[in-house]
Amino acid sequence: MSNFFETGIILENEKARLEPLQESHFEALNEIAMNNELWKFTSVNIKSRADFRKYFNEALSEKEKRNAYPFAIFDKQENRYGGCTRFGNISFEHKRMEIGWTWYHPQLQRTGLNRNCKFLLLSYAFETIDLNRVELKTSHTNLRSQNAMEQIGAVKEGILRKHMINPDGSLRDSVIYSFIKEEWPEIKQRIFKNYF
């Protein structure tokens, strides 16, 4: 995995293309990020171009530190950029990582874009780099996100109490979900059979 962070990983199918995040994506993604509703359940508060610049630069910095691999999401059917996601909390030593930091333009939510992206990311994680575990987490108040994770076969493992502090100072409990390698073939056939 020594060259993982230097590799230009592009994941795509008929609906979605995930491109390694780079500076050229900033303007298109900044426009999407100005939709305040995207950040309601997150630990960041994006209200301005400067806020998003900080968020964007931190994503690139995490890649440089080899902690994360962020992607820009391109919706091939709509022919436009639709949001961001990333592999994060990467531990090749323990053969695990997290999929998260995911957001989409409100018009592209519930269009199948997210499910296509999750299929591409999970396939890469289990079939290409042979991980044992992929984690997802969300706010305990984000019921829509929890439902979406369960619909794609993620297993709810529990709640991390007082896990984070929200931008407004309130405390967030985080709900943890996961996939493991042994479960992936069945989930792939049952949930994602139309995606490959």
Image (spheres, rainbow, N blue to C red):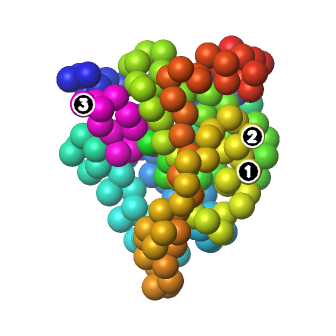
Assess whether mark 1 and mark 3 are in contact (beta carbons under 8 angstroms).
no
In percent of width and height, residue 78 lies at 73, 36
Is residue 18 visible in the rendered image? The answer is no
Q: Residue furthest front?
A: 158
Instruction: Verify whether residue 85 appears in magenta.
Output: yes
* Element under disc 3: loop
How packed is label 3: few (under 14 Cα within 10 Å), some, or many (20 or more)?
few
Q: Relative to residue 14, is residue 125 drawn left or right?
A: left
Nearer the observer, 149 or 15: 149
How packed is label 1: few (under 14 Cα within 10 Å), some, or many (20 or more)?
few
Q: In the rendered structure, which segment of residues is drawn in magenta?
A: 82-97
Give the residue displayed 71% in from the left and 61% down from the top.
Answer: 143
Give the residue displayed 71% in from the left and 16% down from the top.
Answer: 189
In percent of width and height, residue 121 lies at 53, 30
Instruction: Verify whether residue 42 appears in magenta.
Output: no
Vertical position of residue 185 compared to residue 165: above or below = above
Q: Relative to residue 117, is residue 88 drawn left or right?
A: left
* Element under disc 2: helix
Give the residue displayed 61% in from the left and 71% down from the top.
Answer: 40
User: Which of the marked residues, 3 or 2, is nearer the chain's N terminus?
Assistant: 3
Q: Disc 3 marks which amino acid?
A: Glu
User: Which of the marked residues, 3 or 1, is nearer the chain's N terminus?
Assistant: 3
Assess whether mark 2 and mark 1 are in contact (beta carbons under 8 angstroms).
yes
Name which quarter of the figure residue 50 lies in.
bottom left
